[in-house]
């Protein structure tokens, strides 16, 4: 493949240089402070959450990534601490569009006139400053404002960037984002690799993006191809990842060939396994797009920020929960017509709680379809208050006695009344429908839960016992009432255990205070 060359020629100006300094001896650690990691290569380690690197050249300073815009002052201060003149920044090489790497580029450009370089397939998102998923991935950062970022040079990969006496190789490394880009510098015989979030820390890859819904722009197959490509290239001598501060112990940037190869090989195996899961089970993201999860088990999308699931048998059509208020009957009719199920009468609604979010559409739905409503004994008593006909209300035991699908159900000590979990063995899979439990890794939802439990401390032990009971289920598919970030319905490996365990320490913290 042809290699193009983009150049910035030498410019006069007071540029401090460490190019003739002592050879790198491998004893520097990637700590949380500004440090020199090699001759003319520096880490601005006090940036959070991602790192910014500075390369000295005879044409000025080149940055790899720029942090958040809110970190501009810290970036400038760290450069000054290293004896570098921030006004001499001539180029900003972005590794990808995520805001913790890119949003600080525009303040620097306005200050210095530096050119911004970015991967071609991330350039549009950068220029538009969105959509939010392109800038923040699945992280909840409501206090961070986004903005458009000028991209002066789009990079396709395989270019060589020349800044005076310094040449930097460009590698297209899609997977974490479509336009993810790594950079390789040859400095004093050392091959220095800037990994962005493709190589996120000294010990880990940024493969989390490959597990997310497509709107977050990760791609397992592209990432796998990237890792195979990196494995075929010469090993770097120095690895400078996008998030060195995430390593529990500061790491030596000099990376032995065996550790580099092992990191890539483990990533290749991980992504091969993930792609096999996607190919075998389907990439069943609960992202608002209707889809068949298993034969006759459908996700119809979201209404009022709540997911809607239906299960069809030869004689029944069962709906889990009834959100959506007065709009639910028409919405459900439309979604069923657009699915492989086609129009068919609704048999019953199985409630995961009697909270407003699970029942707001019940009165309208029962009036239109004459369907039955299944809940616990205590839930049936609560539903009578909604004015539902008593003949339409069934306790949990009745459907099984009437020959409906076989399911196990047990109560949950959720904050919503009459909460229930349903376990259904279907198409060779264990399917769990459990409403709002467990709470997923959402800052807002978890804060709301801990605050509510702090005010109702008698409920904490019961809530925790419900989590332990859920922990034993080990579902193949988990269908929550509110999927976070369009999560995959399929649970792989230790994912379910990790998800449930996420909440338990938080509850212990609430009780201890």
Image: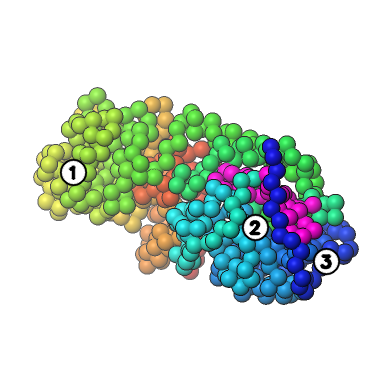
Q: Which residue is mark 1?
A: 329
- Marks 1 and 2: which is nearer the front? 2
Q: Residues within 10 Å of mark 3 (few under 14, many from 20)?
A: some
Coordinates of residue 19 in the picture (x, y in percent): 84, 63
Q: Are marks 1 and 2 in contact (CB under 8 Å)?
A: no
Q: Secondary structure at mark 2?
A: strand
Instruction: Identify whether 448 is placed above or below 211.
Output: below
Viewport quadrant of the N terminus: top right
Residue 493, visible in the rendered structure: no
- Please indicate, yes or no, whether residue 278 appears anywhere in the rendered image: yes
- Name the disc covering residue 18, or none: 3
Residue positioned 69% across, 53% down in the render: 6
Q: Does residue 188 show up magenta in the picture?
A: no
Which of the two discs, 3 and 2, labels the residue nearer the N terminus? 3
Query: Does 165 appear in magenta?
Result: yes
What whole-number distance in Å separates the C-alpha atoms at marks 3 and 1?
70 Å
- In the image, which residues are magenta? 158-186
Asked if residue 175 is positioned above or below residue 414 in the image, the reply reads above
Helix, strand or loop under label 3 = loop
């Amino acid at each position: 493949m042809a290699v193009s060359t983009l150049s910035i020629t030498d410019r006069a100006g007071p540029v401090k240089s460490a190019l003739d300094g002592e050879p790198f001896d491998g004893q520097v650690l990637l700590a949380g402070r500004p440090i020199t990691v090699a001759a003319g290569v520096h880490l601005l380690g006090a940036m959070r959450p991602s790192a910014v690197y500075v390369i000295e050249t005879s044409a000025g300073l080149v940055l790899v990534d720029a942090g958040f815009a809110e970190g501009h002052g810290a970036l400038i201060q760290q450069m000054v601490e290293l004896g570098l003149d921030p006004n001499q920044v001539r180029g900003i090489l972005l590794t990808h569009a995520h805001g913790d790497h890119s949003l600080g580029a525009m303040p620097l450009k306005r200050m210095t006139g530096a050119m911004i370089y970015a991967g071609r397939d991330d350039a549009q998102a950068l220029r538009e400053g969105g959509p939010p998923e392109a800038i923040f991935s699945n992280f909840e950062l409501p206090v961070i404002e986004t903005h458009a970022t000028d991209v002066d040079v789009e990079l396709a990969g395989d270019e060589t960037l020349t800044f005076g006496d310094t040449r930097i190789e460009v590698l297209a490394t899609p997977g974490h984002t479509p336009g993810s880009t790594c950079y390789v510098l040859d400095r004093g015989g050392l091959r220095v690799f800037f990994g962005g979030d493709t190589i996120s820390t000294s010990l880990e890859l940024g493969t989390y993006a490959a597990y997310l819904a497509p709107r977050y722009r990760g791609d397992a197959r592209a990432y796998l191809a990237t890792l195979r490509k990196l494995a075929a290239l010469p090993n770097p001598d120095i690895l400078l990842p996008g998030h060195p501060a995430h390593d529990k112990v500061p790491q030596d940037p000099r990376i032995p060939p065996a550790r580099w190869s092992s990191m890539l090989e483990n990533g290749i195996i991980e992504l091969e396994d993930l792609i096999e899961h996607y190919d075998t089970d389907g990439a069943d993201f609960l992202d608002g797009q209707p889809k068949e999860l298993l034969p006759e088990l459908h996700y119809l999308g979201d209404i009022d920020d709540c997911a809607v699931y239906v299960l069809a048998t030869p004689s029944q059509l069962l709906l889990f929960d009834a959100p959506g208020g007065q709009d639910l009957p028409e919405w459900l009719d439309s979604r069923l017509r657009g699915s492989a199920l086609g129009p068919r009468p609704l048999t019953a609604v199985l409630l995961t709680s009697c909270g407003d979010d699970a029942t707001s559409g019940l009165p309208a739905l029962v009036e239109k379809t004459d369907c039955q409503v299944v809940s616990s004994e205590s839930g049936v008593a609560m539903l009578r208050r909604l004015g539902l006909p008593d003949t339409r209300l069934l306790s949990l035991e009745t459907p099984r006695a009437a020959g409906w699908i076989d399911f196990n159900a047990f109560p949950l000590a959720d904050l919503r009344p009459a909460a229930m979990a349903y376990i259904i063995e279907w198409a060779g899979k264990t399917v769990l429908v459990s409403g709002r439990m467990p709470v997923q890794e959402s800052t807002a939802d978890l804060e709301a839960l801990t605050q509510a439990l702090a005010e109702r401390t008698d409920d904490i032990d019961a809530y925790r016992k419900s989590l332990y009971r859920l922990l034993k289920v080990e579902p193949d598919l988990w269908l929550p009432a509110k999927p976070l970030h369009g999560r995959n319905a399929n649970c792989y490996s230790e994912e379910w255990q990790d998800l449930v365990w996420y909440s338990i320490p938080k509850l212990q913290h609430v009780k201890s205070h």
